[in-house]
């Protein structure tokens, strides 16, 4: 009950701010910064701050590029307008609450919150987890159960060995990862994957002009909502996949993203057979780029297994779901809701096969 009352206090203030700027809607980072301001004005140590508090977070302000600083200043101004319904005069705030500094800390320390299928749904700040350093080949991964962040080990970890996570999507080529890390986190990664530029050749295999066109098309997809929008996305995907059949292998990362996009479009349009066709083509590249235990591969296997089940391909579905289970028990754990859903689907598949 106490937690519910505290949550209502934040929710009430946020609703008032959102209503005041309607019909405009602030970015997730502004809403997160607003919640941080409310909590700083009403001090209370949450579970995530037991080891490391917001005041301890690094901002790397001096190392940020001028372009980055200018973007953060703009967000700080947006935050001031957003909070005006609750805080009329920002100059009256305690000196410790500086809107620009809040954004520098959020930029370097926030986590992208994902749903059960590892799709981004928002951003959050978990101060204790900010103690973890980055590696493109980490020994831990982060998964979410609602807004609860779970840290899971995916490799055998020796006593005294540092725990690491990946701050970015490891699928991208080394040069892109380095640019992203330097721009947002102000450091250069020197892990073995970066030193060896592992799998970069496979990631950009095929004709350059073809994958650049596919890259632009994938980046141009903006959260379709209606059936018509999904149909347009699918038509674009099908056209490019067809025209590039002899130009790009499925291991090209932009071709892979296009296959994922086509699969999503088919699922949203109820075209299960086509969705399975696209999804099946992704499993080889996922195995190549996410070897060992990785939550993205587990989720992809589960999605394909569901589609095989829907097409009455029960032996194939069971084998795919078993592969997903073997990974997910490590990346998510037995108590995670997605793991429970996977086990239920696997049991259904086994029951159908027993009566056939």
Image (cartoon, rainbow, N blue to C red):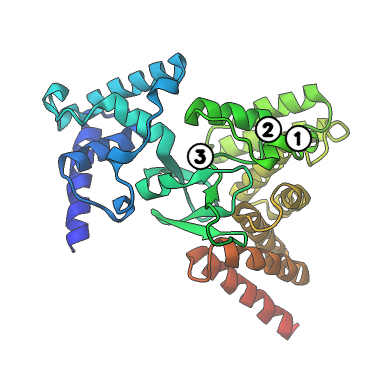
Residue drawn at (44%, 21%) of the image: 64
Q: Earlier in the sequence, mark 3 or mark 2?
A: 2
Q: Is residue 319 above or below residue 14?
A: below
Tag nearer the camera, 1 or 3: 1
Q: Secondary structure at mark 3?
A: loop
173 relative to 341 in the view: left or right? right
Identify residue for label 1.
200
Query: Which residue is pictured at 40% across the width and 21% down the height?
Result: 62
Quadrant location of the C terminus in the rendered image = bottom right
What residue is rendered at 30% in x and 27% in y?
A: 101
Secondary element type, mark 2: helix
Query: Which x, y percent locates residue 184?
Result: 49, 29
Dots 1 and 2: beta carbons under 8 Å?
yes
Q: Give how far across and how far down residue 215 sits, in percent.
A: 68, 28
Q: Which mark is residue 225?
A: 3
Q: Secondary structure at mark 1?
A: helix
Question: In the displayed structure, does residue 344 sit left or right of residue 36?
Answer: right
Q: Determine the CA span between mark 3 and mark 2.
A: 33 Å
Q: Is residue 25 visible?
A: no
Of callouts 1 and 2, the N-terminal one: 2
């Amino acid at each position: 009950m106490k937690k519910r009352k505290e949550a209502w206090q934040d929710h009430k203030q946020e609703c008032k701010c959102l209503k005041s700027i309607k019909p405009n809607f602030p970015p997730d980072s502004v809403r997160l910064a607003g919640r941080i301001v409310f909590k700083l004005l009403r001090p209370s140590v949450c579970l995530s701050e037991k080891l490391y508090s917001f005041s301890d977070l690094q901002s790397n302000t001096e190392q940020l590029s001028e372009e980055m600083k200018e973007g953060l200043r703009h967000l700080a101004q947006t935050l001031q307008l957003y909070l005006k319904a609750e805080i009329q005069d920002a100059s009256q705030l305690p000196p410790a609450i500086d809107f620009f500094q809040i954004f520098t800390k959020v930029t370097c320390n926030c986590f992208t919150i994902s749903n059960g299928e590892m799709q981004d749904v928002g951003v959050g700040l978990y101060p204790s987890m900010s103690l973890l350093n980055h590696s493109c080949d980490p020994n831990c991964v982060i998964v979410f159960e609602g807004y609860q962040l779970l840290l899971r080990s995916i490799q055998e970890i020796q006593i005294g060995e540092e725990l690491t996570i990946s701050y970015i999507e490891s699928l991208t080529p080394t040069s892109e990862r380095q640019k992203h890390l330097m721009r947002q986190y102000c450091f250069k990664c020197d892990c073995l994957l970066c030193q060896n530029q592992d799998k970069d050749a496979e990631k950009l295999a095929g004709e350059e002009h073809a994958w650049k066109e596919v890259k632009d098309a994938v980046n141009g997809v903006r959260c379709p909502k209606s059936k018509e929008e999904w149909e347009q996305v699918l038509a674009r995907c099908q056209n490019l996949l067809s025209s590039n059949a002899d130009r790009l292998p499925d291991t090209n990362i932009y071709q892979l993203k296009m296959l994922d996009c086509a699969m999503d479009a088919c699922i949203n349009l109820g075209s299960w057979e086509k969705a399975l066709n696209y999804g099946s083509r992704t499993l080889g590249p996922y195995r190549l780029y996410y070897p060992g235990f990785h939550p993205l591969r587990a989720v992809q296997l589960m999605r394909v297994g569901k589609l095989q089940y829907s097409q009455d391909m029960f032996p194939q579905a069971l084998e795919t779901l078993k592969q997903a289970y073997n990974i997910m028990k490590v990346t998510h754990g037995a108590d995670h809701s997605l793991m429970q859903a996977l086990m239920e689907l696997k049991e259904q598949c086994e029951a159908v096969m027993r009566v056939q």
